[in-house]
Amino acid sequence: MIALGDRAVAAARALAALDTRRKNAILRGMADAIEAQRATLQAANSQDLAAGHVAGLSAAMLDRLTLSEARVAAMADGLREVAALRDPVGRVLRRTKRPNGLVIVKRRVPIGVIAIIYESRPNVTADAAGLCLKAGNAVILRGGKEALHSNGAIVAAMLAGGTPQGLPADAVQWIATPDRDAVKELVQLEGRVDLVMPRGGESLIRAVMAQARVPVIKHYKGVCHTYVDADADLKMALAIVENAKCQRPGVCNAMETLLVHQDVAARFLPMVARRLGVERHVELRGDDAARAIVPGMIPATGDDWHAEYLDLILAVRVVPSLEEAVSHIQRYGSAHSDAIVTSNQETAARFLRDVDSATVYVNASTRFTDGGEFGMGAEIGISTDKLHARGPMGLEELTTYKYQVTGTGQIRK
């Protein structure tokens, strides 16, 4: 692992010297190779899916693991989209000239070596590599054992496509062993790894945090809320709630708790029960007030308010006010993504101000918390931290900055 880190450091230096045109050519070469090797990638993925079925992986986990033709195409498209994005490296953030004549330039630069530790989704392999490379960073990838064959095939395709275009040796490295000790060693490579980003379940992220000696950007889980206000358009609210819960329930930006103002609960909750409970087969778990309106709901427990189900299960609570909705979100939420549905602009403004989450919505689904949807290209992850990066992480979040100072012989007195 030390040797792997040393190679990554050397690769990061080489990447930092590449111009935008060369990096874009590398990314497009990778995209072409992924498309050309679609059959190989899907054959490797079939091995992982077969092993996943034997191991009893959940439907949500198998969905994350699957490399359909559309997802293979999306990986290639994502690399091309990243190539088309403006290069953040070298961008001047601020330029000042001091009274003594010193010129101080604050300039965006690569971070260096980034380690990505992730589970299930093999498309993360291409997304992470593409974004790291465009931002001038070497990347060390450590996927989960359930996607071992898929990840290996994707890395091989990217190297085959990128190397002829000038990809530096060891700029993309992959840890093929499923041995957990490899992760422990990786996150302790001080001086070799500059940043670790774990993507996966809460247990994985907490394990990384417990072992890491290098900086980690994380989000433990996505307990996302939608609050339907007294002044909501209920037809709009129903569409938003259905999308936030059902469009893809096994992801971190899916809604897990629905909060409904008491003034509209009697009208809105039967609509939810029909659309989500009956038509979409969502298991509804309600508090006493919600169950008084829809008796068929399962009684919610205290654990339900903290739960990230990643499944067709929804906790439902009736609240008396905006303040109570915000208080619930602050107490039980994960600072990921939370939404309000309302036609009252003052209420919307208060929600935006008072909910301290990475992404806060008015009249839109939480499912939009995604780097691609935000125009960043394929994201590398979503941060609920407050330092360095917050929310979907694209190219700019994979850079840092340094000060470049030019003088004419000045000395400090």
Image (cartoon, rainbow, N blue to C red):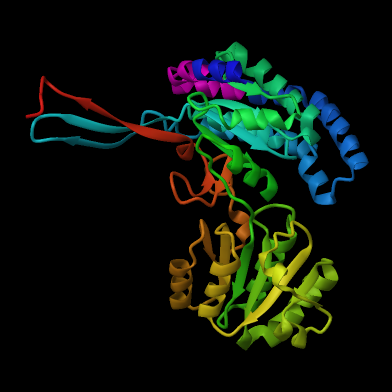
**Residue drawn at 62 percent across, 66 percent down:** 225
Q: How many marks?
A: 0
| Image quarter (top left, top right, bottom left or bottom right) of the N terminus | top right
Residue 93 visible to an observer of this rendering: yes
The magenta stretch is: 11-28
Q: Residue 164 sits in which quadrant?
A: top right
Please say whether residue 270 is one of the residues in the magenta stretch.
no
Please say whether residue 12 is one of the residues in the magenta stretch.
yes
Identify which residue, 196 or 86, lies in the foreground.
196
Point out residue 161 in the picture as x, y percentages from the top left corner: 65, 18
Residue 378 visible to an observer of this rendering: no
**Residue drawn at 78 percent across, 72 percent down:** 284
Q: Residue 319 sits in which quadrant?
A: bottom right
Point out residue 49 in the picture as x, y percentages from the top left corner: 86, 37
Q: Residue 406 sits in which quadrant?
A: top left
Q: Where is 355 relative to 14, above or below?
A: below
**Residue drawn at 80 percent across, 50 percent down:** 60
Position of 298 compared to 303: left or right?
right
Point out residue 183 in the picture as x, y percentages from the top left corner: 66, 32
| Image quarter (top left, top right, bottom left or bottom right) of the C terminus | top left
Position of 6 compared to 118: left or right?
left
